[in-house]
Structures are given as C-alpha cells and as structure tokens.
Amino acid sequence: MQALIRRANKEDLGSLRSFLSRANLGTDGLTEETVDYFLLLETEDGTLKGSLGMEAFTEFGLLRSLVVSPGQAEKEIFILFDQMVQLAKEKGMKGLFLATNKSVALPFFELMGFQRSEREDLPSEFFHSEHIRHVLNVDNSLFLKFSL
C-alpha cells in the first residue's frame, strides 16, 4: 500500500497528539498555530503511520517528534526528511537542528546530511525553548545541524 506525506492541519491535532503520546513523546507546543509545521505519513486510507515536526525559530528549525510505526520503509523516512527540508526552505530558514541521545541513529542522520554541532553553536533563541531545555538535561544528548 502506498504511503502519502502531507502537511498536518488543525483537524489533525487530536489524532497527532494521540499518535505521539502512544510513542511516549510529549505534545507540548503542538497547537493550532504550530500544527502546520508537522508532516504526516499516512496510508491511502488515512491511517497515521509516521510524523515529523519542527519547532520554528527566526532562521532555524528544531526537528522533533519523529515517529514511524514499525514496518515503515527507510525510503519513506527519507522522504519525510526531504519534505521537511522543503518546508523549512519555504519558511525562509537557513538550517535545521535535531537533538538525539541515540548514538545508534547517528549514521542515518549523517547519511541525510546532518553534521554534529556543539551546544555552544546552537542559536541563542533555542535556549528559550522548553524542549531544548529538557534535551540539555538528558544524558548523552547530541545536536546535529543541516544547512539549507
């Protein structure tokens, strides 16, 4: 069955929050104003199989809420990232950051074009983000940057 990727909208808030909660991810900051910074991966019948969101700042975005159901092809995850890059470009951003504490994921992100970034190289406005403050307190957290 073909997977479809589309931008989330206000009508998706409930199902997206539920999907993220089932994956043990927080939904803080997921509002009617921010939902259009989320992409959804769905089956043809509309079943949600994946998501990728972005917390938008002036010139940079912070990727968050990457969740895919078991069995999704790597190709679909690559397309999710590619579509997020396109969205960031549309919004006039200069780069994307992500945080992870899963070193096993580093080869995948590096293959996508992300490079390691030190905490002191993060844009200063990121430190106003509740999500970033939480990530900074997680052991072994790493930051990666993708330049647009």
Image: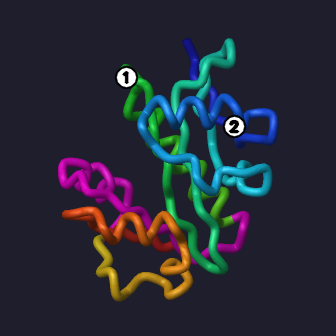
User: Which of the image's four quarters has the C terminus?
Assistant: bottom right
Q: Secondary structure at mark 2?
A: strand
Does residue 3 sit above or below 5 in this rendering?
Answer: above
Residue in the picture at 53% in, 50% down? 82
Q: Secondary structure at mark 1?
A: loop
Does residue 102 sit above or below 60 in this rendering?
Answer: above
Q: Amino acid at mark 2?
A: Arg
Q: Label for residue 6?
A: 2
**Of the pair 70 and 114, the residue shown nearer to us:** 70
In the shown orientation, is residue 97 left or right of residue 106?
A: right
Residue in the picture at 29% in, 59% down? 110
Q: Label for residue 24?
A: none
> Which label lies toward us, 2 or 1?
1
The residues tagged by marks 2 and 1 sit, at their Cα atoms, a distance apart of 19 Å
Q: Which residues are magenta?
A: 90-115
| Residue 90 location (% of width, % of height) | 72, 64
Q: Label for residue 70?
A: 1
In the shown orientation, is residue 131 left or right of residue 111?
A: right
Residue 51 location, quadrant: top right
| Residue 108 location (% of width, % of height) | 29, 49
